[in-house]
Amino acid sequence: MGTEPLSDSAGGGLVNTLVKNGALPEKILINDLRLKPILQPFCDDLQIELLLVDELDFLPEAMNSISDFLKGSP
């Protein structure tokens, strides 16, 4: 387990993901209320809507899709 504060790791993680992606999303969905005050300033600066949702039920399918893409599967 890392010793980095949640605010540092969450904000840095968002920035790293956006830089690697090379494009900005219109919305980011989160399911942890603790992340909202941490990520909101980044999202405001980048004009990204930050939405709190109950569940990220699409996440397993999205992870499988990304995994298949990285493996070169159709």
Image: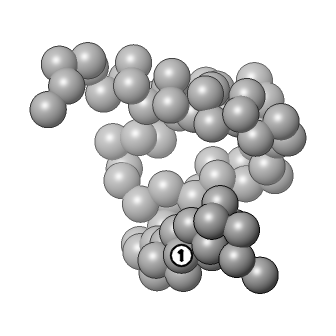
Between 47 and 5, the one lying in front of the other is 5
Q: Position of residue 53 (x, y in %)?
A: 49, 67
Q: Position of residue 24 (x, y in %)?
A: 82, 41
Q: Position of residue 15 (x, y in %)?
A: 62, 26
Q: Is residue 54 above or below residue 17?
A: below
Which residue was labeled with disc 1?
64
**Residue 58 seen in the figure:** no
Q: Is residue 63 left or right of residue 2?
A: right
> Few, some or many C-alpha atoms within 10 Å of disc 1 (few <14, some 14-19, many ≥20)?
few
Q: Is residue 46 left or right of residue 5?
A: right
Q: Position of residue 20 (x, y in %)?
A: 71, 34
Locate residue 5: give its quadrant: top left
Between 50 and 22, the one lying in front of the other is 22
Locate residue 38: give its quadrant: top left
Q: Residue furthest right?
A: 23
- Residue at x 47% of width, y 41% of height: 36
- Residue at x 76% of width, y 41% of height: 21
Q: Is residue 24 above or below residue 16?
A: below
- Residue at x 41% of width, y 60% of height: 31
Report the quarter where the N terminus lies. Answer: top left
Q: Is residue 17 left or right of residue 4?
A: right
**Amino acid at pointer 1:** Asn
Colour mode of the rendering: one colour
Q: Is residue 39 left or right of residue 6?
A: right
**Residue 57 seen in the figure:** yes
Q: Is residue 61 above or below residue 43?
A: below
- Residue at x 57% of width, y 33% of height: 14
SS label for mark 1: helix
